[in-house]
Image: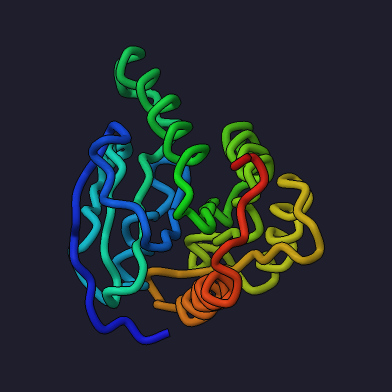
Amino acid sequence: MIIKSVEFLTSAVRKEQYPPEGVPEIAFAGRSNVGKSSLINLLMNRKRLAKVSQNPGKTRTINFFAVNDSFRIVDLPGYGFARVSKAEAEKWGPMMEAYLSGRSDLLKVVQLVDIRHAPSAQDKQMYEYLQYYGLDGLVVATKADKIGRSELNRNLAVIRRELKLKKTDRVIPVSALNKTGTEEVLSAMEEILSANRNDPTETREGDA
């Protein structure tokens, strides 16, 4: 996939603030500080498309971007950050659930996990939720530059085991620092979009 154009569309917290339907979407989800914004910037070949912050919990809205005038990427709020108020944290669950469960244009959610650690309870919960709605199957293991080659396969195996991935599910190690793994992620995204173009009437489990 070649990224020719990317445009920020809107930030939303409610359904009525979403962009109009009719355009396929691929969303990105992960714990706060997992490197989600850095990955999106790298994939889109833009330095400051998604805001990168040293302070976890920066993304607190659902952010929509138009790509190549043909699909959208959606940056979901990071979960699992403790230093926000309880009231604010409680808003994120319903906000994300409303989008994930009710957005017919959503084809897939790319879940990010930190390759250095076993998936957290919240990572597992998120993946189970994605499985329920048929949005699972693509996991990106970030910060691959932080471990040695001997650890790589072992840690990927832990991720597969802890998230209970199927054999057909993909786990792609990525390093935003070394700019590795992005071509594989873009290729996976292209496959998702191509499958949708070939069968645009296909619905996700749970849409009925």
Q: Can residue 181 be seen in this snapshot?
A: no
Which image quarter is the C terminus in? top right
Residue 139: name its quadrant. Answer: bottom right
Viewer-side residue, 202 vs 180: 202
Residue at x 28% of width, y 33% of height: 13
Residue at x 60% of width, y 71% of height: 199
Left or right side of 18 for 79: right
Residue 192: name its quadrant. Answer: bottom right
Q: Position of residue 186 (x, y in %)?
A: 47, 77
Q: Position of residue 18 (x, y in %)?
A: 28, 44
Viewer-side residue, 185 vs 144: 185
Residue at x 26% of width, y 35% of height: 16
For residue 83, above or below residue 43: above
Q: Position of residue 185 (x, y in %)?
A: 51, 73
Left or right side of 115 for 95: left
Residue at x 52% of width, y 53% of height: 109
Instruction: Say how the picture is coloured.
Output: rainbow
Q: Position of residue 153 (x, y in %)?
A: 72, 68
Viewer-side residue, 1 vs 206: 206
Q: Can residue 13 be seen in this snapshot?
A: yes
Give the total number of marks visible in the rendering: 0
Left or right side of 46 for 202: right
Which image quarter is the N terminus in? bottom left
Residue 198: name its quadrant. Answer: bottom right
For residue 91, above or below residue 125: above
For residue 183, above or below residue 53: below
Q: Which residue is most to the top?
A: 87
